[in-house]
Amino acid sequence: MEFENGEIEGVRIRPLTKHLDERGFLVETYRTDEFPEDVRPVMSYVSSTEPGQSRGPHEHADQTDTFSFIGPGNFKIYLWDNRNRSETFGNRMIVFAGEDRHLSLTIPPGIVHAYRNISRLKPGLVINYPNRLYAGAGKKERVDEVRHEDAEDHFYRDFQST
């Protein structure tokens, strides 16, 4: 399958505002009043990615992710619309975010996503606010992920070189 560059239906990119003072800074990464009920988070987590390292690509059947990229570190984020019934099926987006461009991205189910820390020396932090609990209540359910990073012949593997 060939992907074309273009917007992806349902992906929401929201600039984040950094408020500075003598103590440091504050960035609002999530506000309930800015999200529809069906994508409001039920948990959050922070991940650290070393320079040059990647996470993904994977997608979710039911889960919506809302990632906040505020630094340290900068990321190249890859999104592919894998939803057969979407108006933007087959589109690919590349977004840069992190220390130099504070963004929040909301990624609906069926959108394959991956990111790579493009910083030379700094690990990068990412906060995620998914609308589903990882492995369900008590971690007793199947994890909602379709992983693509280990498929040797899969076109998503090319994201590290683009």
Image (cartoon, rainbow, N blue to C red):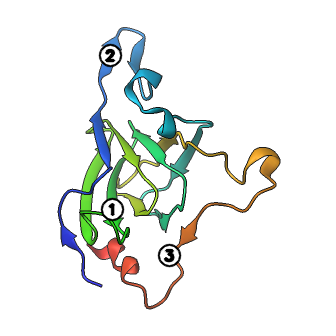
103 vs 9, nearest the viewer: 9
Residue on which the image places disc 2 = 19
Residue located farthest toward the bottom when viewing the structure as drawn: 153
- Which marked residue is nearer to the observer: mark 2 or mark 3? 3
Q: Position of residue 90 (x, y in %)?
A: 27, 72
52 vs 4, nearest the viewer: 4
Contact, CB < 8 Å: mark 2 with mark 3? no
In percent of the image, x 62 and y 60: which residue is there? 144
Placement of 142 over or under 121, stated as above or below = below
Q: Amino acid at mark 3?
A: Glu
Q: Amino acid at mark 1?
A: Tyr
In percent of the image, x 45 and y 28: which residue is there? 30
Q: Is residue 54 left or right of residue 92?
A: right
Residue on which the image places disc 3 = 149
Q: Position of residue 59 (x, y in %)?
A: 49, 64
Q: Earlier in the sequence, mark 2 or mark 1?
A: 2
- Which marked residue is nearer to the observer: mark 2 or mark 1? 1
Q: Is residue 89 left or right of residue 37?
A: left
Q: Earlier in the sequence, mark 1 or mark 3?
A: 1
Question: Disc 2 to disc 3, how far (Cα)?
Answer: 37 Å
Q: Earlier in the sequence, mark 2 or mark 3?
A: 2
Placement of 125 over or under 53, stated as above or below = above
Q: Position of residue 18 (x, y in %)?
A: 31, 22
Q: Position of residue 119 (x, y in %)?
A: 35, 53
Callout 3 secondary element: loop
Residue on which the image places disc 1 = 78
- The quarter of the rendered structure image containing the N terminus is bottom left
